[in-house]
Amino acid sequence: MSNRLPVELSKAYRLLNHGPTVLVTSAHGDAANVMAAAWSMPLDFSPPKVAVVIDRTTRTRELVEASGEFALNVPSRQIALETLAAGSASGRDIDKFRELGLVTFASENIGAPLVEGCLGWLECRVIPEPHIQGTYDLFLGEVVAAWADPDAFRDGHWRFEEGTPRSIHYIAGGNFFETGGAFEVKK
């Protein structure tokens, strides 16, 4: 299991606030799947909520609708190739975890697995909104637990020291960028 520490739920939004690509994991019964998503975001602090687009044609969508749960995993550059592949193949055709060599571990509050090699993990329960799910493929989730790799995120903040692992952001056409250094603006 990845090195991880709990993230205070009121600070969970900070794991997504900078717009990283995420791996959405889901499970129902004996089936589990993973997909990449560039379109996710935090929505609220208390209780913490997130939004993610999950297309109606995906295996992930079927599992999320059946289970009412999903996890958002924030990948690092070390698994960028697997992240791209997870967004390019269908879970109906292959077992993406096995085929892509993605190692998982159990979440604590939901059935969806969590992915090794990530920097943050958010365990979520679907907030049913049939209209926006059906019309816009947009799913809302309440974050019920959040975790982070302490080398990358600690005390409610991302770390930016030299050599610190960073989140990745999908641009298009197989291109990503890695989060850069932070700077503070004082009034």
Image (cartoon, rainbow, N blue to C red):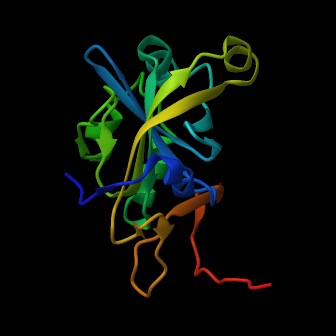
Foreground pick, 72 / 85:
72
Residue 121 point in image, percent of width and height: 40, 48
Against 30, residue 74 (above or below) is below
Q: In this view, does 106 lie to the left or right of 76?
A: left
Residue 171 point in image, percent of width and height: 67, 58
Q: Quadrant of residue 149?
A: bottom left
Q: Which residue lies furthest to the right in this view?
A: 187
Foreground pick, 186 / 176:
186
Q: In which quarter of the image is residue 34?
A: top left
Residue 15 point in image, percent of width and height: 51, 56
Which residue is painted at 52% across and 31% down in the image?
A: 142
Against 161, residue 122 (above or below) is above
Which residue is painted at 24% across and 60% down in the image?
A: 3
Q: In this view, does 17 lie to the left or right of 87?
A: right
Foreground pick, 132 / 172:
132
Which residue is painted at 61% across and 29% down in the image?
A: 140
Which residue is painted at 49% across and 80% down in the image?
A: 160
Against 156, residue 25 (above or below) is above
